[in-house]
Each structure stands twice: as structure tokens, then as C-alpha cells.
Image: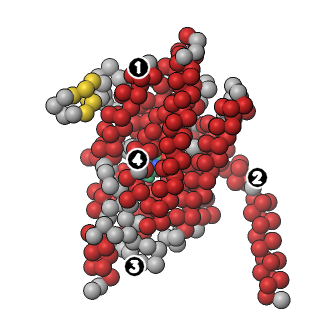
């Protein structure tokens, strides 16, 4: 059996492709692109919430937020390791991010204006991430699927802490309730954009589905997220900013309004509210960390010399 047939059979039988297996170059390239951008998203995603660590309203909230932001760092490093199993070079991937040659999730290009944003990010952004990432636990590429299992467990803690934070604020003052509604208004539509362009305009979905890298299309996961979130908003007592949102008994799903795809295109091409700031911070962190990388490399070289001598 030739290599392509063996690869196709493995995918057909829902079995895993492992790093040592032969794979089409295009399969490898798709995975490097997707996993690298996922890793970049986790690392850049530390900035919006990190912005509130020093200003958390209590020690408990600070400890929870610290743990969450540290988790995101770990997810990023875990995913860079998954990309390395495909032969990608971590330093090159970071350079591509900093040079704007690789993407990260659009959602992290919006500002976090109040502490309610920390709760809404946990509720909506991590909630959307769970919708998008749980199916990836069944992705055909072994290392990615296995990384997703651990990451999804931690994402569910992220979502729950955000929702609990908002529940607390909704039981607080009128001003706190207004902060939660304001944050929900600002993060709802960008959360729907996280799932990517409409299927009809998605350049990669068809092939990613054929290779069982993606298990659902962008629109299917977006719909699942809306259906899951509407009852949560009702329980919280906030209004989702979409006058067209209504249950469609015939479809068995919520109908919702048109997403502003022009905004989505602006943000993913680098012209969102915080793109420049996010990349500048990442570039500065990389430059300021050069001495650590040099020291680690010098230490590793000395140890290698010692073991040879
Ligand atoms: N932000 C930025 N770029 C996006 C995007 C978004 N929300 N949605 C799509 N794009 C880009 C794609 O990367 C692609 O551009 P490229 O060819 O330069 O890579 C282009 O728009 C066309 O989109 P497609 O739908 O054809 O691309 P994909 O098939 O790759 O689907 C995706 C996009 C759904 C994001 C998919 O890549 C995916 O599921 N990735 C893995 C999960 C992931 O990265 N999630 C990011 C969320 S951040 C996060 O989870 C952190 C958590 O802590 C909150």
C-alpha cells in the first residue's frame, strides 16, 4: 500500500496521524498554520486580562486571574511544542507573529475597559474557545488532539470563574450591573467572530474537515455557541446586544443578526482597536527576554561540553 493510501485509510478509520507517520505536505502545513496561530492566540491573549492583575478588586480575584493568565501562557507553550512535532521552529513562529506574518485570534484586539471585562472574557471568550476546541480533541493529528484534552479542562475553569464573577457583580450595585451589561455589549459580536468567517468564505474549512483536523464548520460551532449562551445570559440577567436574536422552533436553534464582517476583516488584517499595542508588547517582551534565551543557550552549551569532556 502506498503512503498516500495508508494516510487516507488512517483518516477514514478515524485513527490518529502521529509525528513519525508520512503525511501530505499540505496536511502538515495546515496543521503548522492552525496550531501556531492557536499558540500565538494564547500568548497574546494574556495581555487583555493581564491588564487587570494589579487592579483586581480583591486578593481572591487577583489569585484567580493570575492562575488563568498563567494557564494561557502554558497553553501557548504546549501548542508551540505540538507545532514543533511537525518540524516547525518555535523561534521562527514567534518571529512570524511579531512581524505580523502569522495571525492570532481577532478577539484579543479589543480593550478591557473595566473589571467586568475579565468576567465577560471568561464567560464569552473562553466559552467560545471551549465550543471551538472540544471538537479538536478528536482532531486527526495526535499531538494536537492530546494537547486539546488538557487545555479544554483548564478552559472550563476559565469559563466558570468568569461566569461566577459576573453572577457576583449582578447581585451587586446598579453600577456593577451596568458594567456587566456594558462589557457584554462590547464583547458579544467579537466573540461570534472568533469562530472565523462564514463557511462560504472559509478558505480552509473544506480541506480541514476532509482531513478531520476540524470536526465541525465555523458556522456550526458559532450556532452551537449562540444556542448555549442565550440561556446563560438570561440566567445572568443581561441582554445580548442583538435585537434579531430569537428562538426558531422550526430550526431548533436561535436565529441571530448579521455579523459585521467588514469589522472582522479589518481586525484580522491588523487594523483592530488594539492590534498595534498587542504586537508592540509582544515584541518588547521578546526583546527584553533575549538575555534569558542567551543565558540558557550558554548554560546548555557548557553542560554539553562537560558531558563530552
Ligand atoms: N482571528 C484571526 N484570524 C482568523 C479568525 C479569527 N477569529 N478566524 C479565521 N481567521 C483566519 C484564518 O486563520 C485564515 O487565515 P490564514 O489563512 O492566514 O491562516 C482565514 O481567516 C480564513 O479562515 P478559515 O475559516 O478558512 O481558517 P481556519 O479553517 O483555520 O478556521 C479557526 C479558523 C476557526 C480559528 C481555526 O483556525 C481553529 O479552530 N483554530 C484552532 C483554535 C484557535 O486557534 N482558537 C483561537 C481562540 S483563542 C483561545 O482559544 C484562547 C483561549 O484562552 C480563549
Q: Is residue 206 above or below residue 111?
A: below
Residue at the outermost left position: 250
Q: Mark 3 vs ligand 1: CB under 8 Å?
A: no
Q: Is residue 21 above or below residue 108?
A: below
Q: Is the C-beta separation of discs 1 and 4 under 8 Å? A: no
Please tell me whether mark 3 or mark 4 is closer to you in this view. 4
At a point 69% along the width and 37% down the height, the residue shown is 63
Residue at disc 2, secondary structure: helix
In the rendering, at what x and y percent does residue 250 appear? 16, 31
Please tell me whether mark 3 or mark 2 is closer to you in this view. 3
Please tell me whether mark 1 or mark 2 is closer to you in this view. 1
Residue at disc 3, secondary structure: loop
Front residue of this view, candidates 280 and 148: 148
Q: Is the C-beta separation of discs 3 and 4 under 8 Å? A: no
Q: CA distance from mark 3 to mark 4?
A: 27 Å
Q: CA distance from mark 1 to mark 2?
A: 43 Å
Q: Which residue is tagged 3?
A: 22
In the rendering, at what x and y percent does residue 84 appear? 55, 68
Q: Is residue 118 left or right of residue 203?
A: right
Image quadrant in which the C terminus is located:
bottom right
Residue at disc 1, secondary structure: loop
Q: Mark 4 vs ligand 1: CB under 8 Å?
A: yes
Q: CA distance from mark 2 to mark 4?
A: 33 Å
At a point 32% along the width and 55% down the height, the residue shown is 215
Q: Residues within 10 Å of mark 4 (few under 14, many from 20)?
A: many
At a point 38% along the width and 69% down the height, the residue shown is 16
Q: Which residue is tagged 2?
A: 288
Q: Which residue is tagged 1?
A: 239
Q: Is residue 241 left or right of residue 83?
A: left
Q: Earlier in the sequence, mark 2 or mark 4?
A: 4
Q: How many marks?
A: 4
Amino acid at each position: 500500500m502506498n503512503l498516500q493510501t495508508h494516510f487516507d485509510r488512517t483518516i477514514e478509520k478515524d485513527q490518529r496521524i502521529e509525528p513519525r507517520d508520512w503525511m501530505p505536505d499540505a496536511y502538515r502545513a495546515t496543521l503548522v498554520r492552525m496550531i501556531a496561530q492557536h499558540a500565538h492566540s494564547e500568548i497574546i491573549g494574556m495581555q487583555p486580562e493581564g491588564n487587570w492583575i494589579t487592579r483586581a478588586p480583591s486578593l481572591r480575584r487577583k489569585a484567580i486571574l493570575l492562575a488563568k493568565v498563567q494557564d494561557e501562557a502554558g497553553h501557548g507553550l504546549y501548542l508551540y511544542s505540538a507545532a514543533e512535532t511537525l518540524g516547525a521552529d518555535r523561534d521562527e513562529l514567534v518571529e512570524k507573529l511579531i512581524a505580523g506574518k502569522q495571525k492570532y485570534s481577532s478577539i484579543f484586539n479589543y480593550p478591557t475597559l473595566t473589571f467586568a471585562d475579565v468576567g465577560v472574557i471568561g464567560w464569552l471568550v473562553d466559552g467560545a474557545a471551549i465550543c471551538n476546541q472540544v471538537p479538536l480533541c478528536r482532531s486527526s493529528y495526535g499531538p494536537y488532539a492530546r494537547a486539546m484534552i488538557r487545555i479544554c479542562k483548564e478552559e472550563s475553569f476559565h469559563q466558570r470563574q468568569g461566569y461566577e464573577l459576573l453572577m457576583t457583580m449582578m447581585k451587586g450595585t446598579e453600577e456593577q450591573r451596568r458594567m456587566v451589561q456594558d462589557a457584554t455589549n462590547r464583547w458579544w459580536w467579537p466573540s461570534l467572530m472568533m469562530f472565523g468567517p462564514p463557511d462560504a468564505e472559509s478558505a480552509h474549512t473544506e480541506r480541514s474537515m476532509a482531513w478531520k483536523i476540524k470536526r465541525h464548520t465555523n458556522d456550526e460551532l458559532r450556532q452551537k455557541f449562540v444556542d448555549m449562551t442565550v440561556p446563560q445570559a438570561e440566567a445572568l440577567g443581561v441582554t445580548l446586544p442583538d435585537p434579531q436574536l430569537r428562538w426558531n422552533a422550526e430550526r431548533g436553534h436561535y436565529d441571530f443578526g448579521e455579523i459585521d464582517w467588514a469589522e472582522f476583516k479589518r481586525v484580522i488584517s491588523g487594523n483592530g482597536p488594539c492590534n498595534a499595542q498587542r504586537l508592540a508588547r509582544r515584541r518588547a517582551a521578546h526583546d527584553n527576554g533575549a538575555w534569558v534565551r542567551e543565558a540558557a543557550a550558554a548554560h546548555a552549551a557548557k553542560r554539553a561540553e562537560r558531558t563530552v569532556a
